[in-house]
Amino acid sequence: MTATCMESNIGSIKTEEVVFIRKRIESSGGYDVFSLQEFVEDGRRPFALTRAQVADVAPDVLKGLLVEQIPEYLRGGPSRKVHVLVSTGAGTGRALAFYEAALQPLLDTLGFASSEGGHGPSAQAESDNRGNRYDLVITKDAQSIGQFAQDLNEGGPEQEAIEMDHTVILLSGDGGIVELLNGKARTDSGSRTQIRTPLVAVLPLGTGNALFNSLHKPVKPVGGPTAPSGLVQGLRTLLTGAAAPLPSFEVAFSRGSRLITYTSADGEEADKVKQRADAVSHLRGAIVASYGFHSQVVWESDTPAYRAHGAKRFGMVAQELLRESHAYSAEVEITRPGEERKRVERDGHAYVLATLVSNLEETFTISPASRPLDGRLRLVHFGDVGGERTMDIMMRAYDGGRHVDMRWAGEGGGGPEERVGYDEIAEVRLTTLERDPRWRKVCVDGTIVEIPQGGSMTVTVEEEAHLRILVDRLIVS
């Protein structure tokens, strides 16, 4: 950690970079101000946690950033375990660098030591929080997070009668959430140890970070010189947040559906990575289930070669798909709350997306009516409108979600009025009629499933929460 000299006040420090502030206990008094610096790739490490000593801090700044004690959910003990889960494959692979340069020094300062050692707590933190420890888990492959989630339910003999809490600090993107969700849900029954619903604190290191951006949308200004980055906001929530149940949905697939993943040996070239298909009947999600343009972009951009381009990979693939402008042959049936199932009267589809969140990216508002944790499933859908109009609809989503108000004249200007469909639903069932397997891919929170011709996926909101999520206190107040 980089330490700076004593300042008279916080005025010379960028408030948007401040993670937290702590009173000094030494005779000199004043405050320690901890900030996160993030660097563009210029040969330096991408992150640095810095500490500045200041004599005074404005009351309005202290109100939101002063940390006087470790929150209860981060205090390890006989009935609570704290885990740091680093997803090395998330986004563009920055999670481990963030842990080493920012999170580990921060936890050391607060008096934590990892199961693998660490640098040891600082003198001040040691006096406040003796014995705080966390288990460090660094993923090795695509199965690591799911296996971790299952292991949470496997307590030793001495734990059988203990009600165990788990706090998971997750350095990942949306994929890490869905892997935790599905791994945990598979073992919710029949466990030897009675475990409370795990609490997850997300530090957004994925590509789109849809869940994080949606949960923090009401409290995090977008853009501008004073907006904190997602990682600064994530660290603030880690230290001052509140727990809430994470809404989720279940997706049921017809027989013959296959989970599509990519596997490779260590060091193998990206173009030699092999596709793997495994049978799947159910998945759980907390963000999105889609078919058509969205799922196609996610699937075709998910090869390791494309993932190296980060968020740019989606645009690269999208341009190719817009040129093709495929009309997806499928039947879509929706059930609105309190109503019977009805078929969407449309021959060809371009976009069918069910979501529990407002944003798929920080500035891409797919569901403007969605609010954090409201648990309401909404469907965005439109037909075969061609590449140009599809692009126009997507750009309106970047303009605060204005796509949901779009209407236009039907084919040739004389047909029935068409629009972007936007409905609150209890369930949606999609049956694909495509012959070519390329056009039979659906997406559940970034996970790709291929459905057989005539097969279906059915998306339903769940009543039981399998995870809790850490959010800004203003969200649950």
Image (tube, rainbow, N blue to C red):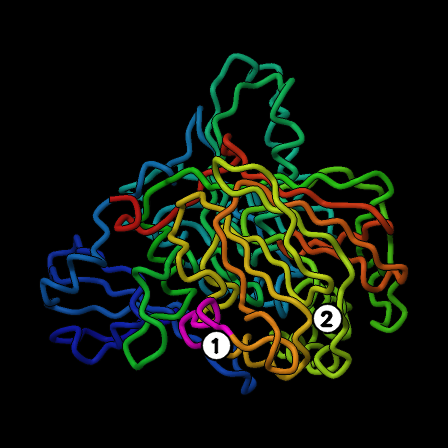
* Observer-nearest of 26 and 39: 39
Residue located beneath label 1 in the image: 396
The residue segment tinted magenta is 397-407
The quarter of the displayed image where residue 441 is located = bottom right
| Percent of width and height locating residue 85 | 56, 49
Image position, residue 301 (x, y; %): 73, 71
Residue that appears at 83% across and 67% down: 267
Percent coordinates x, y for residue 40 in the rendering: 50, 83
* 312 shown above or below 178: below
Q: Amino acid at mark 1?
A: Arg
Q: Marks 2 and 1: CB-CB under 8 Å?
A: no
Identity of the residue furthest to the top in this view: 161
Residue 55 vs residue 413, the one in the foreground: 413
The amino acid type, in three-letter code, at marker 2 is Ser
**Residue 301: mark in rendering:** 2
Q: Check residue 405 for magenta coloring.
A: yes
Quadrant for the N terminus, please: bottom left
Callout in the foreground (2, 1): 1
